[in-house]
Image: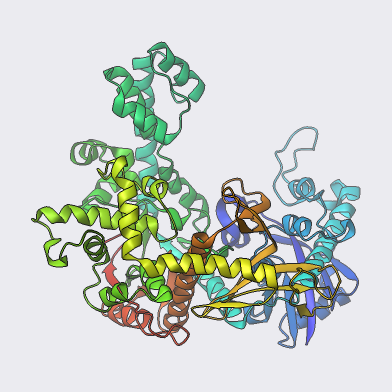
Amino acid sequence: MRHLSVDLETFSPVDIKKSGLYKYVQSPDFQILLLAYSWDGGEVGIIDFTRPDSQTDPGWLALKVALQDPNVIKHAYNAAFEWYCLNRIAQTPLEQWRCTQLHGLYCGYPMGLAAISSVLGLPEDKRKSSVGAALIRTFCSPVKPTKSNGGRTRTLPHHEPERWELFKEYCQQDVVAEMAVLEKLKAWPVPEKEEMLYRLDQNINTAGVAVDMELVDSAIHCDDVVNGQLMAEAQQLSGLDNPNSAVQLSGWLSGHGVDAPNMQKATVKELAENTKDLIVKRILEIRQELAKTSVKKYYAMREAVCADGRMRGLLQFYGANRTGRWAGRIVQVQNLPRNYLETLEHARECVKGKKLDALKVVYGNIPDTLSQLIRTAFVPPPGKVFAVADFSAIEARVIAWLAGEQWRQDVFATHGKIYEASASAMFGVPLELIKKGNPEYELRQKGKVAELALGYQGSKGALINMGALTMGLMEDELPEIVRRWRNANKRIVDLWYKVERAAIEVMQTGRPVNVRGVWFARACDLGSGMVRRPNAAGATDGAEAAMDFFTITLPSGRKLFYAKPFLAPNQFGSDSLHYYGMDQETKKWGVQETYGGKLVENIVQAIARDCLAEALLATAPYYQIVMHVHDEAVFEVDKPEAVGFICEVMGRPIAWAPGLLLKAEGFICEFYKKE
């Protein structure tokens, strides 16, 4: 097998950040400008497609053959971009491509080429060049015509020949950096099943999902009108020029005796609920309505929808590299508002008809109504329906199976009412009494919040973050709920501490440890591609390791990677596992601390992800998957009865997880929704 590494620079009038790869490439004015390439890690060549003789360039003629040759493996950083772009000018099968970005994500590293080059400690001559952003703005996007630039709408090579030569060097340097990253990671290959999932993900993204553009355009119209009305009302009530300005509004509130430390959503909500001044209350309510950011997803849909009425590129494979779960892109389908309206079809028709008065009378809060309808903008094509199938309580099932918590397994093997069963176990109340109409039914709420918050070593704070206080629970009763849940789930509690002890033992001794079928280990690569396990002192044959990971091997065989691990005291003075990773809040690379419950959360969510992966692979040959959200998959189907088959497939036993009880429930709909 030969290996070909490539990188492209392209032009399109479409903003790729707003509209995504597929609309960007589908533009009639899309053009590949440069192609840098290297054979088997050798010298990097460049093909300049702006030259009239580029199509007869010997290098390009050889590449055209190689792009279709199954004996040539093609590598690129974010290979989906190169693969999709190159298919505009030459056929190149997806099966022959490997994505170095995916490789880095699999090993726990950040997404961007510049970021991973930095955290891997590549030498400067092997890193991504820092001059790229300015050059891309110059040559890859339209420019505003001015007198100084001669009224042109884009910059061509002959306009700035010196910068063009620099741009060619930049493109070549990307190949150098990509190959250096690949060399660093070669001892930790991406499993073939993950490569299969990556290809399936690209097929899902490329197929896309249809969008009801009549609803989208009408929703944007309604939003514009309502925002104008709300702004006018707020201006009249407050006398402010811009009542949507945080600075102006904070000053106005202060003048009315209201101390607003910030204008965050939770703060504004609390102030609105507690003030007795009706004008202040209404101003804060308007602020809440104007800040309904979810409505902005309609604008994102309009930007990204392709000429055929479908949106593409909604999913990011391995977007959550701590667990391998997918992430959302463009409209963030992983974070869509839930719908609670019982008359969704009527609300959709009112919006399409731009019947603002009817929306106001029937539904009250128009921004909230528009927000609830966002899901419904995704629709099947004519003659088809959506089949929506969702794993039932997947994380609760996985943690029960992993910990060997038998009473929970019995619940999932029978009635499946985990919230009621949890409340029954916690409070010693017979399960049959916890039903609507009985006073014991109020215990279900305590069981529910405990299930949602406490499975990963959470305590009082986790209950509060999960909304325990807004559910009507009192703060002083939360410690008792924690105690009761832990007493009822002793095997899960035991799992937290076993996992924590395993991590510490691995770091202290270098020996792998198995906890209920999950392997914990530490391994290093000295740069030769040979993986070695550290000794008890953390060294490997007396040499300093080039790469060093704490790894967790899941039942599926997939690994979770924690880079540059070490032990250090936690806030309680005890040793705990630390590693380098991406901070979920700051989005910066640095030292992260973890503990038993957090590691169990990673493992459980990763196993749940692997269950979804099995379901996607098993159903994809039969039906078109248009998207999936958390533990739910959405299919385009011809016949409503297809949903039964899909749920049956998703509920099948998995070979690598004997005894794991899975169940899926589904429904048919003519637009995407939560049932």
Compared across the picture, whether 440 is left or right of 557 comes to left
Compared across the picture, whether 99 is left or right of 129 comes to left
Compared across the picture, whether 207 is left or right of 213 comes to right
Q: Is residue 222 above or below residue 515?
A: above
Q: Which quadrant would residue 183 be assigned to in this image?
A: bottom right
Q: Is residue 620 above or below residue 114?
A: below
Q: Say which of 521 and 397 sits in front.
A: 521
Q: Is residue 263 above or below residue 511?
A: above
Give the quarter of the figure containing the C terminus.
bottom left
* Colour mode of the rendering: rainbow
x and y percent of residue 592 in the render?
63, 54
Q: Say which of 373 and 267 sits in front.
A: 267
Which residue is located at x 62 percent, y 61 percent? 25
x and y percent of residue 469 in the render?
31, 42
| Residue 66 showing in the rendered view | yes
Residue lying furthest left in this view?
437
Q: Say which of 552 and 245 sits in front.
A: 552
Give the quarter of the figure containing the N terminus.
bottom right
x and y percent of residue 624 in the render?
43, 76
Which residue is located at x 58 percent, y 47 percent? 571
| Residue 227 showing in the rendered view | no
Which residue is located at x 84 percent, y 77 percent? 528
Q: Say which of 193 and 76 sits in front.
A: 193
x and y percent of residue 98 in the render?
68, 75
